Amino acid sequence: MGNKLSAVPDVELTVVPKHVAIIMDGNGRWAKKRFLKRVAGHKAGVDTVKMVIETSAQLGVEVVTFFAFSSENWNRPRDEVSTLMDLFVTSLEKEVAQLHEKNIRLRFIGDRSRFSEKLQKRINEAEKLTCDNQGMQIVIAANYGGKWDITDAVRKIAQQIRKGSLEPEDISEELIQNTISLGDLPEPDFFIRTSGEHRISNFMIWQLAYTELYFTDIFWPDFDRVEYVKALKSFADRERRFGKTGEQVAKLNNA
């Protein structure tokens, strides 16, 4: 499969990931470097999100998951958290209709209980509006943590055991996979983190077990289309073996 992106000449991708997971890091540092308030970086980062969605749709990526707000981010300064919540609401109000027109489904993962009633309402409305769309899926991880995700799945399984609908011996990787967030979607093939940090920071711990990782020093607001395609090209150039030898993989690919 050869996909060419006209906006970036002479770039051809032989393989495109089905699911891209992204930690959008460096907004605050981007703003500080420009002597701006941290919130200016978060607002600038929204344009990068739009670019990634547009480019992913062009290339045939099926799912993009954005880590928008971690369960640890509540520890940030109160005014920054408040502004981020407001930004979530306004972005949903502005962008959901356009996503719907493009047949894109919007989903959210994470513990919503701590959000305001207004934000929870907007999230529910966005999911309901786009739930039948058959195009690309955009997932927003908000008040999310990988440990929370696994704990929540274990709790749900324990409830089934208590009801008698499940035995402890029935617990398997497949059951956990089907119970955890996004169990109905392909696991992320490719993970991107901007701003020079080299860790996954409690993001989709279960789902990233075999994901290809990519780190860049570029701050999220500066992560443009050229850089995104550069990252995707890195993925296309990798050999994914899943425990097999290179010879076994080659044999399977040529079968």
Image (tube, grey):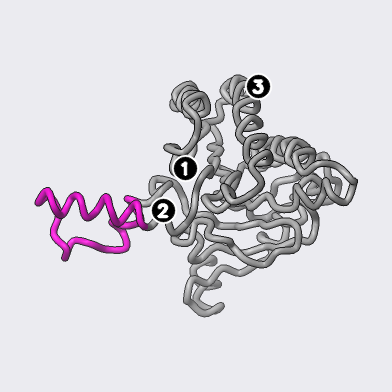
Three-letter residue code for mark 2: Asp
Where residue 28 sits: x, y (%)?
76, 48
Q: Which residue is mark 2?
A: 149
User: Which badge, 2 or 3, comes first in the chain's sequence?
Assistant: 3
Q: Secondary structure at mark 1?
A: strand
Q: CA distance from mark 2 to mark 1?
A: 9 Å
Q: Are marks 3 and 1 in contact (CB under 8 Å)?
A: no
Q: Which residues are magenta?
A: 151-179
Q: CA distance from mark 3 to mark 1?
A: 20 Å
The answer to whether residue 53 is left or right of residue 177 is right
The answer to whether residue 95 is left or right of residue 153 is right
State yes or no: residue 255 in magenta. Answer: no
Q: Which residue is mark 1?
A: 109
Q: Main secondary structure of the magenta part?
A: helix
Give neighbour class at mark 3: few <14, some 14-19, many 20+ (Cα, 10 Å). few
Q: Which residue is mark 3?
A: 94
Q: Are marks 2 and 1 in contact (CB under 8 Å)?
A: yes
Q: Is residue 133 among the parts visible in the rendering?
A: no
Three-letter residue code for mark 3: Lys
Q: Name above or below for residue 225 compared with residue 239.
A: above
Give neighbour class at mark 2: few <14, some 14-19, many 20+ (Cα, 10 Å). many
Where residue 41 sits: x, y (%)?
78, 42
